């Protein structure tokens, strides 16, 4: 069902369902923070119970991952319909916590499993992701394999019916609270750099896995160092073919870029439009324009860039016209989204002056502190998921057809 | 690009192949070198009239096809790619816009068919100072003998020497800026060519006690809003031409990056240049979205048409500014020679940047429209 009137009636149904099912106890609660596991412990019992009810109701509809097939916990809907669900949930002031609760599950592991997984793997793993019950992390980067991911050295040795993993991963998001991990490991040390790599899945609750949260500049610890010491990954949990993990991870990272091209996240910076904040902190001149003309021009540039990004994302969706394809456009959109978001956070700080450099305490309002932390955590946007520079490598090579600029092993 | 109707796709493809085969940039170069009078090749212009391009914004009852601004914009983009010179934009886009928006039935009946068949070339005469601004118009229109008398001076009038009718912006007694249709051969009108870097037709005008009849007055009831809306729509059209100039500049540059060898390698294999190309390509995609959104907003009668126009001119301008500079830089020495086309694109880019307000003016306008 794709025509406008059917989509509209679908929208009405979604709107009605959300109004009837979103628990009243969750109104106004920072659900994104809760679902991310950061502030979950501080939540009241009532909020926790409401959250669990809301998760179950969404999961029963298959709306944790609406585009996945029904047999794997999804709702078998189109991208457009999934967008409608997201929009209506957002409109109602609600929030769909399931993608957040599964870590990398809904956005990256699931779509890759749908493409590369065996029937048995799909049946075993996807439902737990779609329902929001199983959180996944990804063991990709290593201390000496960041942008040059293929130089990774964590080894997986064939032990008959399982692989024994040894090595260290880093920047594993939510490793300390995840139940499962997708790890990129070296299964053939003699093969070329990208040819001896495999992708395996393993449970985190086992003796051979140790996680140490890393404290970031923003004060939070969403990432871990993850150590594998004879950690066990079953043979049945090899995703894709042996030594073909590089193809799997390239696809996985495309899904990651796609998820980082500018969603509808809840953001402190967005709570009050920047020009309103600027009018409040900076003031206006006799003509009604912002008193700081230099700031005003830079603010307009950021607004225009944000609109250009939104229009481009929309245009690419329209041009794809229903074709499900993770296009090369993701690199362009990831970088423009990053530029806009980081620029916006910098402007917010500049506008707030000394109220924009607070770390904690009563001298600063909650939203001011939130913006500062968001500014700091946002610095990661141009680093994770393939850095800004790696995206430009991808554009120059895969979109423009220029020769490879990096050294291959 | 935007999703197109079948009719739009056909017209765009037709324009693209006609421009490439009949009016490539070499034709513009030959024309420039010939020192001919006028800013364009009359044969190319009559071919555009024959293809119906002059009627795209004109209703069917006046001999046009009424296909709208996105369609016209797609053609301007194609013309921009090969730097095609013609009065199409000044007359059939800006002129037709002014008559459509401000004309009475009688005025439409009189002017629109003449725009469509090319027998009249209209152009807007707005600028009075070296920097485009809308806040002050010194040129005056004083009511007299049931008509008006115009006095003042204009500069940087597009197709100013070829135009047969000038649409002059002048302040009236109530302080608003209104538009008046002034035959170019009226007593009291003198015009002089301006020689600009892009070798096109621009004129400086002086109007001394130029008497026009009441039916020369466009859209009296709209106050300043007609003048502003015509300029907004003009900017969205300029942005589409700028997009074409920029996209072709990008293609020339990318081609050079893939073929020019230094240090034993094609220069596009150097990461500094690969990344620069990636940045320019990303800026091009953003510019396309904004330029198309500008003309689409007009077709849709969107509430934010004025803001989208400012966005389209500013963002496309930003891309073209960087792109035209990199076009020269990446081509190196060859880019500096007159024999190579890069210079023609750089020069046209800066003229378009200046036309109807530069990036900074449109950013200022955008902020004002958004209320800060």
Image (cartoon, helix red, strand yellow):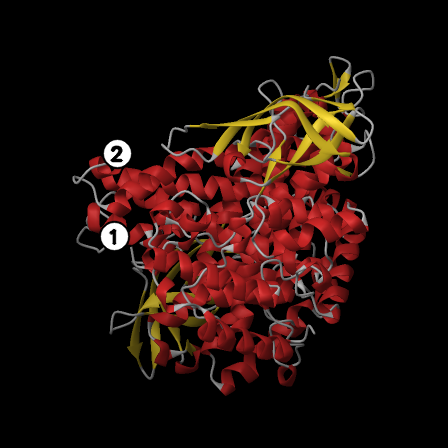
In this view of the protein, which residue sits in the foreground, B174 or B190?
Answer: B174
Residue at 29% across, 71% down: B172
**Vertical relation: A220 (above or below) A57:** above
* Local SS, label 2: loop
Alpha-carbon neighbours of circle 1 within 10 Å: few (<14), some, or many (≥20)? some
Which label was assigned to residue A357? 2
> On the image, which quarter does residue B324 sit in?
top right
Residue that mark 1 sits on: A289
Q: Is residue B360 above or below residue B211?
A: above
Q: Quadrant of residue A194?
A: top right
Quadrant where the C terminus of chain A lies? top right
Does residue B208 appear anywhere in the picture? Answer: no
Of B201 and B191, nearer the camera is B201
- Lower position in the chain sequence, tag 1 or tag 2: 1
Which residue reaches farthest front? A207
Is residue A288 in view?
yes
Q: State which quarter of the image contains the N terminus of chain A.
A: bottom right
């Amino acid at each position: 069902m794709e025509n406008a009137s059917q989509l509209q009636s679908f929208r009405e149904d979604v709107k009605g369902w959300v109004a009837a099912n979103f628990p009243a106890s969750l109104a106004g609660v920072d659900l994104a923070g809760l679902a991310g596991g950061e502030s979950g412990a501080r939540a009241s019992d009532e909020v926790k119970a409401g959250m669990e009810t809301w998760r179950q109701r969404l999961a029963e509809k298959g709306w944790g991952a609406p585009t996945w097939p029904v047999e794997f916990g999804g709702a078998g809907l189109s991208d457009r319909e999934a967008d409608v669900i997201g929009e209506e949930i957002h409109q109602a002031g609600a929030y769909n916590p399931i993608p957040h609760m599964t870590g990398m599950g809904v956005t990256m592991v699931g779509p890759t499993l749908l493409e590369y997984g065996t029937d048995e793997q799909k049946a075993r793993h996807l439902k737990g992701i779609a329902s929001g019950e199983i959180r996944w992390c990804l063991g990709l980067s290593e201390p000496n394999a960041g942008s040059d991911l293929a130089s990774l050295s964590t080894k997986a040795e064939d032990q008959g019916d399982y692989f024994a993993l040894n090595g260290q991963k880093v920047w594993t998001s939510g490793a300390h609270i995840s139940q499962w991990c997708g790890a990129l490991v070296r299964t053939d040390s003699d093969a070329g750099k990208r040819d001896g790599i495999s992708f395996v899945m393993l449970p985190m609750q086992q003796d051979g896995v140790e996680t140490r949260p890393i404290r970031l500049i923003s004060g939070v610890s969403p990432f871990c160092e993850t150590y594998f010491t004879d950690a066990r990954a079953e043979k049945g949990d090899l995703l894709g073919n042996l030594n073909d993990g590089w193809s799997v991870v390239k696809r996985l990272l495309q899904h990651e870029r796609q998820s980082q091209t500018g969603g509808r996240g809840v953001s402190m910076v967005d709570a009050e439009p920047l020009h309103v904040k600027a009018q409040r902190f900076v003031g206006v001149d006799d003509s009604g324009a912002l008193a700081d003309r230099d700031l005003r021009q830079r603010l307009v540039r950021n607004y225009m860039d944000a609109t250009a990004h939104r229009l481009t994302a929309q245009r690419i969706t329209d041009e794809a016209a229903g074709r499900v394809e993770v296009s090369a456009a993701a690199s362009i959109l990831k970088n423009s989204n990053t530029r806009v978001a980081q620029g916006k956070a910098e402007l917010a700080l500049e506008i707030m002056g000394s109220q924009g450099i607070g770390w904690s305490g009563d001298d600063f309002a909650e939203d001011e502190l939130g913006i500062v932390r968001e500014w700091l955590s946002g610095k990661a946007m141009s680093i994770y998921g393939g850095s800004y520079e790696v995206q430009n490598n991808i554009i120059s090579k895969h979109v423009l057809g220029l020769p490879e600029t990096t050294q291959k092993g | 690009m935007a999703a197109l109707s079948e009719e739009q796709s056909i017209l765009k493809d037709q324009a693209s192949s006609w421009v490439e085969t009949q009016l490539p940039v070499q034709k513009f170069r030959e024309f420039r070198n010939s020192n001919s009078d006028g800013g364009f090749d009359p044969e190319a212009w009559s071919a555009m009239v024959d293809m119906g391009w002059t009627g795209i914004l004109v209703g069917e009852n006046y001999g046009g096809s009424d296909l709208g601004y996105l369609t016209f914009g797609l053609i301007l983009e194609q013309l921009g790619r090969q730097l095609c010179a013609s009065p199409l934009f000044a007359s059939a886009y800006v002129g037709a816009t002014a008559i459509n928006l401000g004309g009475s039935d009688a005025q439409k009946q009189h002017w629109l068919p003449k725009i469509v068949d090319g027998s009249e070339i209209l152009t807007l005469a707005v600028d009075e100072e070296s920097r485009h601004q809308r806040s002050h118009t010194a040129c005056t229109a004083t009511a007299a003998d049931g008509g008006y008398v115009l006095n003042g001076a204009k500069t940087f009038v597009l197709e100013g020497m070829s135009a047969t009718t000038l649409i002059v912006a002048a302040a009236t007694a109530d302080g608003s800026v209104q538009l008046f249709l002034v035959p170019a051969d009226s007593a009291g009108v003198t015009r002089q060519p301006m020689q600009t870097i892009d070798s096109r037709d621009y004129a400086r005008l002086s109007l001394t006690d130029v008497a026009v009849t009441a039916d020369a007055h466009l859209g009296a009831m709209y106050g300043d809003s007609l003048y502003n809306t015509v300029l907004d729509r003009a900017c969205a059209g300029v942005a589409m031409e700028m997009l074409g100039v920029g996209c072709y500049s990008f293609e020339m540059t990318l081609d050079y990056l893939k073929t020019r060898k230094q240090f034993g390698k094609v220069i596009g294999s150097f990461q500094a240049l690969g990344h620069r190309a990636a940045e320019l390509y990303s800026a091009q995609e953003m510019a396309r979205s904004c330029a198309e959104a500008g003309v689409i907003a007009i077709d849709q009668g969107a509430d934010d048409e004025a803001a989208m126009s400012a966005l389209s001119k500013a963002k496309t301008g930003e891309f073209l500014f960087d792109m035209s500079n990199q076009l020269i830089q990446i081509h190196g020495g060859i880019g500096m020679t007159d024999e190579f086309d890069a210079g023609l694109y750089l020069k046209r880019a800066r003229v378009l940047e200046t036309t109807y307000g530069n990036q900074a003016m449109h950013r200022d306008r955008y902020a004002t429209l958004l209320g800060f």
